[in-house]
Image (cartoon, rainbow, N blue to C red):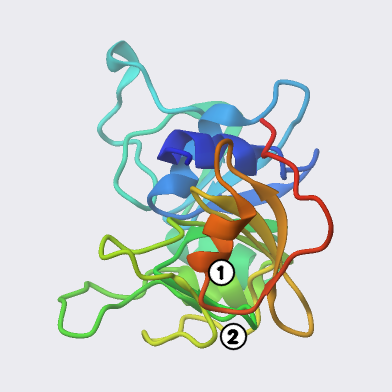
């Protein structure tokens, strides 16, 4: 079973040279620390920053420099600051190649629910709806099950949906899965020490297992 940093490290293997990438709040922000040295990407934050670097060491913290999750960050050489209006123009204009988001639920059709739990106070949806409607590729970073042990990979989402049929790939603490165009989670890799049987027992939605499933690589 992976911890949050290992989930982020595995997702970093999915980024491609030259991509513009938006990192959502939570586990996705950790991906910035694991971008391979031989890959050049530009990380975008919807509060108005293009060119996010790794999280700062204590002596490099600038309280005025934050990402959309209010975490202090660094800027790389050539970074740009601008208004959130311009930032959302980038997103809605389809200029973000890859969006990495957290989720509370994902359905076997690729629907994502990640912004609201009924009865709990939220300040707003943030940029999630725009991001899932506009990015070329959506990867979800999430725990496979809730704290109560219930699967979060479902036949249908039970929470308010952020976007429909948009998720392409999921990396959880147990597995790497593709969302198939016809519906269903195709198991690609399993976390070290995790069996296919365990993943099957913890996935409510349709799970497609084709042949021998290798352990996850980093």
Label 2, label 1: how far apart the Cα atoms are: 12 Å
How far across and down, in percent of the image, does residue 53 sit? 52, 30
Quarter location, residue 77 = top right
- Of the residues tagged 2 and 1, which is closer to the observer? 2
Tell me the element at label 1: helix
How far across and down, in percent of the image, does residue 25 sit? 39, 53
Q: Is residue 92 left or right of residue 188?
A: left
Report the residue at 63% width, 71% height from top.
167
Q: Quadrant of the C terminus?
A: top right
Quarter location, residue 47 = bottom left
Query: Can you identify the residue that label 1 sits on?
Result: 131
Report the residue at 29% width, 75% height from top.
124
Where 208 falls versus 29 (above or below)? below
Query: Can you identify the residue that label 2 sits on?
Result: 164
Marks 2,1: beta carbons within 8 A: no
Determine if residue 140 is in view. no
Quarter location, residue 168 = bottom right
Report the residue at 46% width, 56% height from top.
142
Tell me the element at label 2: loop
How far across and down, in percent of the image, does residue 35 sit? 64, 31
> What crowding class fits label 2: few (fewer than 14 Cα within 10 Å), some (14-19), or many (20 or more)?
some
Q: Nearer the viewer, residue 64 or 126?
A: 126
Q: Determine the residue located farthest toward the right in the rendered image.
A: 211
How far across and down, in percent of the image, does residue 44 sit? 56, 49
Determine if residue 151 is in view. yes
Q: Is residue 8 left or right of residue 122?
A: right
């Amino acid at each position: 079973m992976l911890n949050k940093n290992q989930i982020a490290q595995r997702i970093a293997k999915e980024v491609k040279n030259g991509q513009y990438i938006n990192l959502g709040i939570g586990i996705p922000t950790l991906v910035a620390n694991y971008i391979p040295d031989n890959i050049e990407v530009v990380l975008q934050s919807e509060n108005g920053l293009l060119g996010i670097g790794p999280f700062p060491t204590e002596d490099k913290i600038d309280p005025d420099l934050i990402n959309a999750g209010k975490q202090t960050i660094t800027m790389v050489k050539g970074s740009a600051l601008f208004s959130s209006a311009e930032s959302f123009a980038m997103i809605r204009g389809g200029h973000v190649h890859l969006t990495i988001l957290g989720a509370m639920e994902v359905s076997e059709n690729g629907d994502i629910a990640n912004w609201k739990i009924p009865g709990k106070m939220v300040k707003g949806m943030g940029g999630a709806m725009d991001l899932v409607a506009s990015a070329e590729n959506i990867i979800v970073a999430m725990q496979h099950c809730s704290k109560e042990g219930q699967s979060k990979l479902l036949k249908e989402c039970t929470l308010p949906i952020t976007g429909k049929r948009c998720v392409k790939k999921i990396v959880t603490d147990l597995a790497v899965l593709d969302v198939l165009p016809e519906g269903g989670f195709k198991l690609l890799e399993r976390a070290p020490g995790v069996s296919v049987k365990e993943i099957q027992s913890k996935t409510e939605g349709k799970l497609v297992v084709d042949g021998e499933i290798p352990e996850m690589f980093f």
